[in-house]
Every structure is written in C-alpha cells, then in structure tokens.
Amino acid sequence: MADQSQLVWLFFSVSGRVSRAAYFLGGLLVAIVQAFPLYRFTLVPEGTPESNMWALTFFVAFIGSLWSNIALAVKRLHDLEKPGLVALVLFVPVISIIAFVVLCLFPGMPGPNRYGARTNDRG
C-alpha cells in the first residue's frame, strides 16, 4: 500500500517524474473523482437541497482535480524531458484529449534527466 506522502506527491506536487502507467491510472482516478458527484447530481431533482449538495461536491472535486491533472501532466512531461509549462495545452479543449493520449503512449527518457534520477521519483 502506498504511503500517504506518495499520494500527495503524485496528485499535488509538480516535481519529479511519472511513468505512462502512473499518469494513466492517476488520470483515471481523477476522472472518476470528477464524474461521481456529477453523476449523483443528475439523479436528484433539480433545486432540492440534495442537488445543491451534489453541485457543491462536484465544484470542490473539480477544483481539486484540476490541480491534480496539471501536476500529473507536469511530472509526465518531466519524464519526457520537456518543461512543465507545456501542460498549459491541457486547457485547450480538443488538444487536451490528444495531449492525454500522447502522454499515455510515448515512453519517458531512460535514466536520469534534469527533472529526476528515475521515473516515479520525487526528483
């Protein structure tokens, strides 16, 4: 079982490098965290206290997951020896989907680079 500091690093830190698998699985978890409250919101009648609660839950999950998506992408770019600033393309709607696929498919740089000694390392 991963220790808590590893999970905090994976989802909230922009230092270090992550592998394709860690990026994909982390991105999948973030998508589930976003989708669940949205799904629950669609099941309840509009304008009820329960719908307001799920709307707020979705908003909080979305804001938290937005940073997590950026942090994951920056670390994945670091593994490809690219600057994290390139992660800004995630804010361009169509390009973000293409960028996610590219980051999932292209292997990282073997061995150490300027962003860390090895993949899945805090750097």
Image (cartoon, rainbow, N blue to C red):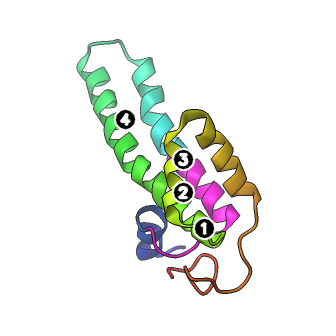
Residue 24 falls within the magenta-colored stretch:
yes
Q: Residue 25: x percent and y percent? A: 62, 56
Q: Residue 117: x percent and y percent? A: 60, 87
Q: Amino acid at mark 2?
A: Val
What residue lies at 44% left-to-right and 71% top-to-bottom?
Answer: 9
Residue bearing the label numbered 3: 89
* Residue 104 visible in rendering: yes
Taking the image as shown, residue 18 lies to the left or right of residue 54, namely right
As drawn, 113 above or below 42: below
Give the mark nearer the N terminus: 1 vs 3: 1
Q: Secondary structure at mark 2?
A: helix
Residue bearing the label numbered 1: 82
Q: Amino acid at mark 1?
A: Lys
What residue lies at 27% left-to-right and 29% top-to-bottom?
Answer: 53
Q: Secondary structure at mark 3?
A: helix
Q: Secondary structure at mark 1?
A: loop
Gap in angstroms between the C-alphas marked 3 and 2: 6 Å
Which region of the structure is painted magenta? Answer: 14-30
Q: Residue 51: x percent and y percent? A: 31, 21
Gap in angstroms between the C-alphas marked 1 and 4: 32 Å
Gap in angstroms between the C-alphas marked 4 and 3: 23 Å
Quadrant in which the N terminus appears: bottom right
Q: Are marks 2 and 1 in contact (CB under 8 Å)?
A: yes
Q: Quadrant of residue 59?
A: top left
Residue bearing the label numbered 4: 58
Residue bearing the label numbered 2: 86
